[in-house]
Amino acid sequence: MEPIFKRIILKLSGEALAGDKGSGIDTETVTNIAKQVKEIHNLGVEVAIVVGGGNFWRGRSSKDMDRATSDYMGMLGTVMNALALQDALENLDVITRVQTAIEMRQVAEPYIRRRAIRHLEKGRIIIFGAGTGNPYFSTDTTAALRAAEIEAEVILLGKKGVDGVYDSDPKLNSNAKKFDTLKYIDILNLGLGIMDSTATSLCMDNKIPLIVFGIDEPNNIVNVILGKKIGTHVKED
């Protein structure tokens, strides 16, 4: 089978890298994700990855701390995840670059749009760390922004513990209805917690499709790339 996309953004939550540990980094989980990324890369897909940092620090949960300080701490968590994922990919002989929105030259390249696109054209995988480099913006917004900047065809949103978008929490409501398709305006109108409203609006304005799927199932990243009908597809048409 042939891949249905040429250039993608893969958005991974920090929790997805923690595996069953719930926090920190689970090496086996990261390696399994890296193997799937290598497989789609070998199919000729240009891959850019945006990682969250919730396995280390969630800025919005620290009510007694200055919000900007808390968000910057979260950004540093995303860089740790990016480096772990880079190491796993390079152990599989996949050339990978980490670019960060906050400059830290001893650790990674600074984010430069044209350089990022050139890396993709040369067959390298890029991991974007440190969010947008600004407090008050989520890594979901980073994924939407970077997808628009590098002209990605789709954002793949790998979720831990859920296999798509539901009208209510399936863990709490056994009658929760799963959506096969949605429009971005539905996410905003129904208040569905897929992405924050800034990220959703950015995707909607730039007509970037989104596929929400479960990251726990083996080979799901590959299955999505090959066009198999899993998860929830979000687009305007």
Image (cartoon, rainbow, N blue to C red):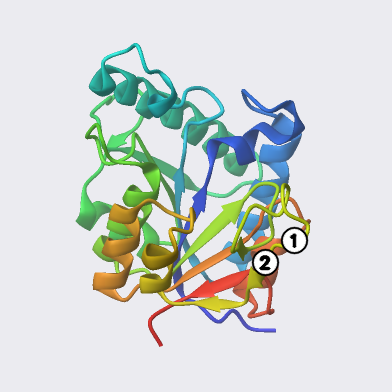
Quarter of the image where one finds residue 92: top right
Q: Position of residue 27 (x, y in %)?
A: 70, 30
Tell which of 204 and 98 is nearer to you: 204
The residue lying at 26 percent from left, 41 percent from top is 132
Seen as rendered, the residue at the extreme top is: 64
Find residue 222 and name its label. 2
Query: Which quadrant is the N terminus positioned in?
Result: bottom right
- Residue 177: name its quadrant: bottom right
- Badge 1 local density, few (<14 within 10 Å), some, or many (20+)? some
Image x and y of residue 138, in percent? 35, 41
Name the residue at the bottom extreme. Answer: 237
What is the three-letter code of the residue carrying label 1? Asn
**Location of mark 1 (residue):** 219
Dot 2 and dot 1 residues touching (CB under 8 Å): yes
Q: Nearer the viewer, residue 153 or 64?
A: 64
In the picture shown, does residue 116 fall above or below 59? Answer: below
Disc 2 on helix, strand or loop? Answer: helix
Q: Is residue 43 visible?
A: no
Q: Which of the labelled discs sits on residue 127, or is there none?
A: none
Q: Quadrant of the C terminus?
A: bottom left
Q: Along the horizontal axis of the image, is 24 left or right of 105?
A: right
- Residue 214 on image: x %, y %: 68, 57
Q: Amino acid at mark 2?
A: Val
Q: Residue at x 54, y 74 (%)?
A: 233
Instruction: From the top left corner, tell me how far across and down residue 45 is, in percent.
Output: 52, 69
C-alpha distance separating marks 2 and 1: 5 Å
Looking at the image, residue 19 sits to the left or right of residue 106; the answer is right
Q: Residue at x 26, y 15 (%)?
A: 66
219 w.r.t. 12: above or below:
below
Q: Secondary structure at mark 1?
A: loop
